[in-house]
Image (cartoon, grey):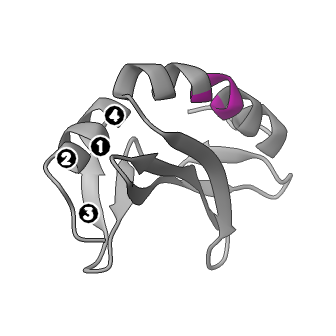
Amino acid sequence: MEYLSRDEILEEMNQSLRPIMEKYEVEDIGIFEEQGEGNHYYIGYTIRKDGEVFMTHTPFVRNEEGLFRPEKNEWIIETDNGDLRGFSSLDDVFEEMSKGLEH
């Protein structure tokens, strides 16, 4: 996987907001980012759907030049009862969200 700048990643995600809202019938969506420990970084979406708010993200690794690459091809849903891991696509995330999560 190639390394990208933070701005490149955020621009790509910004361009996906409207299509995500339409495809998954989302009420509202935004992008969040969070610095993890060491060279770990988390970038994802805060999503409001059916009156519920969910957060999903992908873990990234930052190199010495400040560029990022996904740590692995995985989406994670954050819940009050711990993270749900192992989703390979946003389709999988939204399928799980449609089941109703405790968050």
| Label 3: which secondary element | strand
| Label 1: which secondary element | helix
Residue, disc 2: 96
Q: Mark 3: give few (<14), some (14-19) or many (20+) Cα within 10 Å.
A: some
Evaluate if marks 2 and 1 touch, with contact meaning CB atoms under 8 Å apart.
yes
Span shown in magenta: 13-17
Quadrant containing the N terminus is top right
Evaluate if marks 3 and 2 touch, with contact meaning CB atoms under 8 Å apart.
yes
* Side (left or right) of 29 relative to 103: right
Name the outermost residue toward the left: 99
Type of secondary structure dominating the magenta stretch: helix
Lower sequence index among marks 3 and 2:
3
Residue, disc 3: 84
Percent x, y for residue 60? 58, 54
Lower sequence index among marks 1 and 3:
3
Residue type at tag 1: Val
Percent x, y for residue 53? 42, 59
Give the alpha-carbon distance from disc 3 to disc 4, as whole Å.
Answer: 13 Å
Give the alpha-carbon distance from disc 1 to disc 4, as whole Å.
Answer: 7 Å
